[in-house]
Image (spheres, rainbow, N blue to C red):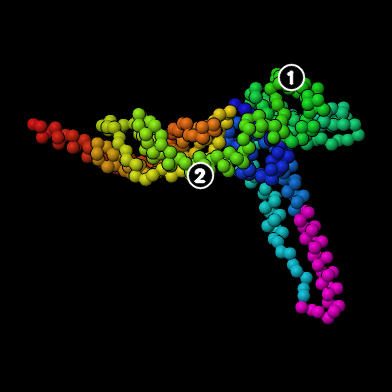
């Protein structure tokens, strides 16, 4: 498990608050990454929103004034067919939406399974002032600049203390705000980690490009825009070997599904279930995730959906929607899909009509009894 903590400049630098950019998307999707965003980072993003709105409103007013002056100059020529253009926007709605941004954004991050790390409750105003007066890093002589970075650092320490993971990476494009010129942690930062019985070596501070280069030589945009597209386009037409024979994608996934014994046995008479694939598996392209990368392979997860018929001893029981999670491996050197299997049955059992199962089971049992009676 790797804990990833993100700084404001990383999120805003990609101009992507919602992790759709290939680089941030890759960080979020890689299996084993646990993402944290300090609350102070969200507060800073929120403050930047208010700055932009204020700048917008000021420019609107300035533009109105300048346009009005130009129109007045035109009117001296006895031309009255022109009026000052109005820049229209709903100020009340804009204010309301901006006021709700932090709570809405926080909720969105949590839905993406990104953790929000609150500011440490044990850091008081007096603590901050004491560090400023002592000129402890990041504060310098004659300046109190660095309060935000100080609070982010204290949040990082809190995260490490809570999770006790050995592998923690803080990604920031402003390393100088957290490290000395020799790329070492300041003495007071090392002391903070020692106080929670954590070695300073457990924490790495990296820029976004440094982190991406540490996990892959392929640029994230290429992974999503080129490799995944080719990969998905090829899946339905590739041949896969399983159980000693070559199969198309539908056959391969369906055989895997049947061998999972998803429903077990029928409830009353313990009959085996039979299945029939009624619709080809459809790949949900929005569900594709790159969950891991090494020197040779790229590992993917994606969802497929279909409709599967359920039978008990040739007695039709029900037809159910089925959603499966597929794990697959793409080998970069050979340009082939080297592994593919069902990793999870997301939806199937809950779609079964139990009454129809019972009726099919009764009918199947009656056929068995009838055949036995005919023997006598």
Q: Mostly what secondary structure, the magenta segment?
A: helix
Which residue is the site of mark 1? 194
Q: Residue at x 50, y 40 (%)?
A: 231
**Mark 2 or 1: the one toward you:** 2
Q: Residue at x 70, y 50 (%)?
A: 99
Picture coordinates of residue 251, whole percent (x, y): 37, 38
Q: Is residue 114 visible?
A: no
Is there a contact, CB below 8 Å, between mark 2 and mark 1?
no
Residue nearest the viewer, comparing 132 with 273: 273
The answer to whether residue 331 is above or below residue 65 is above
Picture coordinates of residue 333, whole percent (x, y): 54, 31
Picture coordinates of residue 44, whole percent (x, y): 74, 42
Quadrant housing residue 135? top right
Which residue is the site of mark 2? 285
Q: Magenta stretch: residue 268 in it?
A: no
Picture coordinates of residue 202, whole percent (x, y): 69, 22
Q: Residue at x 58, y 33 (%)?
A: 30
Quadrant housing residue 188? top right
Q: Residue at x 58, y 43 (%)?
A: 225
What is the secondary structure assignment of the residue under circle 1? helix
Q: Which residues are magenta?
A: 54-81
The answer to whether residue 171 is above or below residue 224 is above
Q: Is residue 276 left or right of residue 175?
A: left
Q: Is residue 152 visible?
A: yes
Q: Which mark is residue 310?
A: none
């Amino acid at each position: 498990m790797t804990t990833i903590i993100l700084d404001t400049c990383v999120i805003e630098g990609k101009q992507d608050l919602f992790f759709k950019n290939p680089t941030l998307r890759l960080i979020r999707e890689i299996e084993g990454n646990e993402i944290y965003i300090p609350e102070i980072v969200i507060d800073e993003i929120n403050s930047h929103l208010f700055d932009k709105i204020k700048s917008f409103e000021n420019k609107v007013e300035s533009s109105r004034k300048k346009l009005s002056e130009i129109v007045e100059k035109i009117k001296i020529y006895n031309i009255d067919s022109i009026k000052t253009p109005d820049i229209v926007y709903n100020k009340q709605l804009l204010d309301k939406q901006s006021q709700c941004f932090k709570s809405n954004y926080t909720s969105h991050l949590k839905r993406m399974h990104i953790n929000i790390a609150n500011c440490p409750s044990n850091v008081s105003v007096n603590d901050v002032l004491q560090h400023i007066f002592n000129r402890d890093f990041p504060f310098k002589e004659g300046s109190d600049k660095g309060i935000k970075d100080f609070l982010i650092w204290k949040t990082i320490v809190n995260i490490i203390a809570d999770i006790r993971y050995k592998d923690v990476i803080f990604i920031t494009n402003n390393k100088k705000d957290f490290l000395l010129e020799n790329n070492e942690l300041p003495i007071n930062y090392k002391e903070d980690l020692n106080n929670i019985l954590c070695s300073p070596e457990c924490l790495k501070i990296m820029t976004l490009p440094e982190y991406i280069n540490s996990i892959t030589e392929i640029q994230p945009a290429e992974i999503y825009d080129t490799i995944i597209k080719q990969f998905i386009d090829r899946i339905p037409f590739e041949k896969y070997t399983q159980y000693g024979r070559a199969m198309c994608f539908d056959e391969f996934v369906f055989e895997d599904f049947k061998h999972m014994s998803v429903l077990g046995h029928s409830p009353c008479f313990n009959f085996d279930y039979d299945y029939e694939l009624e619709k080809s598996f459809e790949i949900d392209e929005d569900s594709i995730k790159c969950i891991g990368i090494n020197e040779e392979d790229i590992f993917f997860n994606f969802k497929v959906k279909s409709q599967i018929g359920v039978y008990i001893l040739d007695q039709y029981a029900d037809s159910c929607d089925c959603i499966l999670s597929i794990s697959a491996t793409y080998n970069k050197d050979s340009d082939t899909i080297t592994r593919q299997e069902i990793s999870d049955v997301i939806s199937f059992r809950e779609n079964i009509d139990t009454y129809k199962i019972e009726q099919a089971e009764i009918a199947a049992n009656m056929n068995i009894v009838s055949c036995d009676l005919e023997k006598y």
